[in-house]
Image (cartoon, rainbow, N blue to C red):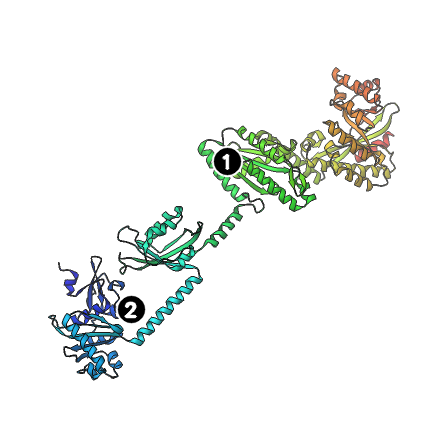
C-alpha cells in the first residue's frame, strides 16, 4: 500500500524547516498541501493553514512544528486555491523573476509598494527600473547567488529568496518574499504590548507561569517557570528549561504523588490539570499554592506535547480556612475540642473499643463552687480560671485521649484502651488532685474542686448521647456524695434515682393541682385534760389511692430542692391557718411544724421565715414551734445551733422530733436550744410488745426531764399506751388514742367541742 505522501503525491518537509520553505514548495510544486515529518509520523500542512499563520504575524523563519498540523490528509472534494488566489492572499510581498531578473509574476501587495495599481504594471521590468543603481546591483548579486547555489537564502529586512523551478526541477529564475515593514512593525508592537500587559496582570494577581514539555513515554520531561514563580518562592530567576525533578524537589513530600497523578491525568487528555499543594520557600517554610494548566499544543513541542499553566499563592486562604475549621470544632475560650469534635472522637472511641475488645471511659466533669468565684470576682477572672483548668486537664491526660469543653464549667474526657473499668480510677484521682491544687490568678488564691461521673463503653451504652447522659447522671451522684470525687455509672442505682425522680414529679404535680393539704392533730395534757398544742401534718388526696400519709411520698423528695420548696409551702400555709383561727376567736395554741434539717440549713431559710412572719403581723411568733430531727454530724449540730438561735430571735421556738431514734440524742439536748422533746412514735407504738423500745422510751423521758425539757409522746394509739406513759411521768400525749389528724375545718369543730 502506498504511503499517505505517495497517495497524495505531495512534497515531504522536515519539522525544522521554516514557513518560507513551505511557501516555496507550495508555489514551486503548484500543490495545495505539504507533508511534514514529525516524530516519525507524517502530518499535513495546507495552504490555508500556512496563510493563516503568516497573517497571525508568525515570522517566516518559524519552524513548521510550531504550527497546528493535521494528522490526517485533507478530505477529498476540498476546494483548492488557485495560484493567483494563493499569492494575493499572502500577507507578504511576493515576486517571481526569470534568470535575467525581469518580473514574471508579482502579487498586489508588491505592486502597491512599488507604486503600481496593478501587478501587470511591473511585468517585464527589473530591479534597474525600480531602484537606484547601487541597490539594483545588490539585488542582481543575490539573485545570481540563488541561481548558482539552488538554495533559498534569508536576507536583510526579512527578505527571503529561493530558486523558481519548473516541474522537472530546472531553475527558471528566482522566487522572493518580503514582509510588509509597516505591518510587521505593527504586529510586533502589538505582541510586545500584549506580553507586557500579561506580565503586569500576572504580577498583580500574584501568579507565576510555567511551560512543561513532557518527554515521550512516561518520562517527566522539561519545564520552565516565569520570574514571578521564582519570586513567590524567594528564589533568583532562572532562564530556560530544566528537568521536572527540580520542581518536584520543591514540593512537600506528602503532596508529590498527588501532583504527579494530576499531571498524568491531564497529560493523558482526561481533563484539565488542577492541584493544590505545598511548595518550599527559600527560607525553609512552605507555601500553599493552587496550580492549574492545560494542554495547549500536541505537535510543536519536541516530545509531541506542550502544557502551560499558572501558580497562585493561596497560603493566606488556607490559613483562613484552617482558622475557620478550628473555630468550628474547638471552644473559643479554652481551645479545647467542642461538642461537635467530641462527638466525632466518641464515635472513634466506640469503634476502637468494639474493634479491639477494650473499654472506653467517658467522663463528665463539673466544677464545684465555680459560680461564686465567677459572681464575686467577675467573668474575666472566671474565664481565666477555666483556661487554667483546661490546661491542667490536658496536662493530666494521655496524648491519645481527649479533653473537651461542653460549656460553662462542664468538661468531658475520653480514655481509650482500658481493660477494666477500674483502670481509669488512678487517672481520675490524679485529675481531682490537680484541680484541687490552689490556683493563683492576679493576686487571688482560688480553690475549686470537681465532681466526675464516668460511663464505660460498651457496658453503659454504645452511642455518644447515651454515654454522655449516663456519665452526667453518675456525676450528680458524685455531687450528692459530697463533691470532689468521682462515681462510675451504676444502672441499678440509676433505676432507683429514675424512680425517685418520677415520684418527685408526681408530688410536685399534686402540689400544683391543689391535692396536698394540711391536717392537724392535737396534743393533750392528761393531768388536766386540756389541749396544749397541735401539729400540722401533710396529707395527699391522691385521686386513685385516697388519702396518703407523708411516709408514702415524702421519701421521694428527701435531699432535693423540691423538699425545701414543699417545706416552705407547709410553713406558709400553717402560719396563715393559725392566724385565721386566731381571728375567728379560737383558743391560741402553739403550732408545731416539721422542718427538715436540710431545709433549715439552707441559706434562704431565715429570710423566708422572716417573710412569712411579716405577712402575718397580728400573730404572735411565740406560737410557732419548729420540729427538727437529729443531725448526722457534729459540724451539722453546730450549724443547726447557730440557725436556731437566729430563728429564736424572731420569736419562734424549737422541739426535737423523733427523739430516741438515733444515737446522739443527749448531745443534741446539750448543744441545741430546744424547749420540747418529742419521743419517736415508732418506739412508743411498739413499747408494749418490745421491752427494748419500752426501755428506750423510759430512758428518753428521764433524759429529757433531766435536761429540763418538756416531753411529748407521739404515736399513742390505745388507752394502755396512755396509762403506761403516765406511769413513767410523761403526761403530754399525741396520737390516734387522743384524736386522729383532721383537716382545718374538722379540727376547728373538734377543738370547739372538746373545750
Residue 207 percent across, percent down from the top left: 41, 59
Depicted 174 relative to depicted 568: above or below: below
- Say whether residue 704 is left or right of residue 494: right
Q: Quadrant of residue 56?
A: bottom left
Residue at 73% from the left image edge and 34% from the top image edge: 599
Q: Position of residue 373 (x, y in %)?
A: 68, 41
Query: Which residue is label 1 attached to?
Result: 462
Q: What residue does disc 2 label?
A: 58
302 to 393, vertically: above or below:
below
Q: Secondary structure at mark 2?
A: loop
Q: How many marks?
A: 2
Closer-to-camera residue (95/697)? 95
* Picture disc at residue 515: none
In the image, is 288 to the left or to the right of 73? right
The N terminus sits in image quarter: bottom left
Q: Is residue 58 above or below residue 466?
A: below
Horizontal relation, residue 611 to residue 422: left or right: right
Q: Position of residue 567 (x, y in %)?
A: 74, 35
Q: Nearer the viewer, residue 606 or 172?
A: 172
Amino acid at each position: 500500500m502506498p504511503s499517505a505522501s505517495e497517495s497524495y503525491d505531495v512534497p515531504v518537509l522536515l519539522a525544522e524547516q521554516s514557513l518560507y520553505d513551505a511557501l516555496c514548495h507550495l508555489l514551486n510544486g503548484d500543490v495545495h498541501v505539504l507533508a511534514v515529518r514529525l516524530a516519525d509520523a507524517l502530518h499535513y500542512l495546507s495552504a490555508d493553514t500556512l496563510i493563516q499563520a503568516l497573517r497571525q504575524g508568525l515570522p517566516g523563519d518559524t519552524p513548521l512544528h510550531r504550527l497546528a498540523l493535521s494528522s490526517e490528509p485533507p478530505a477529498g472534494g476540498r476546494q483548492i486555491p488557485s495560484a493567483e488566489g494563493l499569492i494575493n492572499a499572502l500577507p507578504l510581498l511576493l515576486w517571481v523573476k526569470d534568470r535575467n531578473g525581469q518580473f514574471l509574476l508579482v502579487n498586489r501587495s508588491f505592486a502597491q509598494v512599488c507604486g503600481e495599481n496593478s501587478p501587470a504594471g511591473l511585468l517585464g521590468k527589473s530591479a534597474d527600473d525600480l531602484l537606484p543603481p547601487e541597490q539594483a546591483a545588490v539585488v542582481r548579486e543575490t539573485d545570481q547567488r540563488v541561481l548558482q547555489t539552488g538554495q533559498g537564502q534569508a536576507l536583510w529586512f526579512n527578505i527571503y529568496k529561493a530558486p523558481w523551478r519548473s516541474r522537472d526541477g530546472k531553475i527558471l529564475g528566482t522566487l522572493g518574499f518580503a514582509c510588509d515593514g509597516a505591518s510587521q512593525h505593527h504586529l510586533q508592537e502589538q505582541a510586545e504590548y500584549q506580553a507586557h500587559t500579561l506580565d503586569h496582570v500576572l504580577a498583580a494577581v500574584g501568579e507565576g507561569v510555567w511551560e512543561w514539555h513532557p518527554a515521550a513515554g512516561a518520562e517527566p520531561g522539561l519545564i520552565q517557570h516565569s520570574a514571578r514563580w521564582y519570586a513567590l518562592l524567594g528564589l533568583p530567576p532562572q532562564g530556560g528549561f530544566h528537568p521536572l525533578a527540580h520542581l518536584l524537589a520543591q514540593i512537600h513530600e506528602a503532596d508529590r504523588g498527588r501532583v504527579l497523578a494530576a499531571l498524568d491525568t491531564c497529560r493523558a487528555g482526561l481533563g484539565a490539570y488542577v492541584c493544590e499543594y505545598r511548595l518550599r520557600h527559600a527560607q525553609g517554610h512552605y507555601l500553599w499554592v493552587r496550580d492549574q494548566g492545560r494542554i495547549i499544543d500536541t505537535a510543536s513541542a519536541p516530545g509531541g506535547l506542550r502544557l502551560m499553566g499558572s501558580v497562585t499563592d493561596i497560603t493566606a486562604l488556607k490559613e483562613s480556612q484552617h482558622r475557620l475549621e478550628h473555630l468550628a470544632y474547638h471552644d473559643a475560650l479554652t481551645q479545647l475540642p467542642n461538642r461537635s469534635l467530641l462527638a466525632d472522637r466518641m464515635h472513634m472511641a466506640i469503634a476502637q473499643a468494639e474493634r479491639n475488645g477494650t473499654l472506653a471511659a467517658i467522663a463528665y466533669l463539673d466544677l464545684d463552687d465555680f459560680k461564686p468565684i465567677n459572681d464575686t470576682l467577675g467573668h474575666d477572672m472566671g474565664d481565666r480560671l477555666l483556661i487554667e483548668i483546661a490546661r491542667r486537664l490536658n496536662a493530666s491526660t494521655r496524648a491519645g485521649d481527649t479533653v473537651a469543653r461542653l460549656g460553662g464549667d462542664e468538661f468531658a474526657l475520653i480514655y481509650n484502651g482500658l481493660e477494666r473499668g477500674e483502670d481509669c480510677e488512678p487517672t481520675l484521682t490524679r485529675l481531682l488532685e490537680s484541680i484541687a491544687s490552689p490556683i493563683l490568678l492576679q493576686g487571688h488564691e482560688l480553690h475549686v474542686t470537681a465532681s466526675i461521673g464516668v460511663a464505660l463503653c460498651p457496658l453503659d451504652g454504645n452511642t455518644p448521647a447515651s454515654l454522655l447522659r449516663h456519665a452526667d447522671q453518675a456525676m450528680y451522684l458524685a455531687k450528692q456524695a459530697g463533691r470532689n470525687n468521682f462515681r462510675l455509672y451504676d444502672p441499678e442505682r440509676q433505676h432507683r434515682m429514675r424512680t425517685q425522680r418520677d415520684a418527685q414529679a408526681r408530688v410536685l404535680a399534686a402540689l400544683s393541682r391543689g391535692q396536698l393539704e394540711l391536717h392537724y392533730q392535737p396534743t393533750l395534757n392528761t393531768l388536766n385534760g386540756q389541749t396544749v398544742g397541735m401539729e400540722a401534718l401533710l396529707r395527699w388526696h391522691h385521686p386513685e389511692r385516697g388519702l396518703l400519709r407523708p411516709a408514702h411520698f415524702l421519701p421521694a423528695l428527701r435531699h432535693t430542692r423540691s423538699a425545701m420548696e414543699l417545706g416552705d409551702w407547709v410553713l406558709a400555709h400553717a402560719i396563715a391557718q393559725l392566724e385565721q383561727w386566731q381571728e375567728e376567736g379560737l383558743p391560741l395554741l402553739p403550732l408545731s411544724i416539721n422542718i427538715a434539717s436540710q431545709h433549715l440549713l439552707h441559706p434562704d431559710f431565715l429570710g423566708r421565715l422572716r417573710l412569712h412572719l411579716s405577712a402575718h403581723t397580728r400573730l404572735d411568733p411565740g406560737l410557732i414551734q419548729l420540729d427538727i430531727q437529729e443531725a448526722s454530724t457534729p459540724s451539722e449540730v453546730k450549724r443547726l445551733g447557730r440557725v436556731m438561735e437566729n430563728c429564736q430571735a424572731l420569736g419562734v421556738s424549737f422541739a426535737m422530733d423523733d427523739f430516741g431514734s438515733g444515737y446522739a440524742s443527749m448531745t443534741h439536748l446539750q448543744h441545741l436550744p430546744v424547749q420540747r422533746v418529742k419521743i419517736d412514735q415508732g418506739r412508743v407504738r411498739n413499747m408494749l410488745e418490745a421491752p427494748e423500745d419500752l426501755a428506750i422510751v423510759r430512758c428518753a423521758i428521764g433524759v429529757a426531764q433531766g435536761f429540763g425539757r418538756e416531753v411529748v409522746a407521739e404515736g399513742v394509739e390505745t388507752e394502755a399506751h396512755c396509762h403506761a406513759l403516765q406511769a413513767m411521768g410523761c403526761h403530754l400525749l399525741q396520737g390516734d388514742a387522743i384524736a386522729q389528724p383532721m383537716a382545718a375545718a374538722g379540727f376547728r369543730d373538734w377543738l370547739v367541742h372538746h373545750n
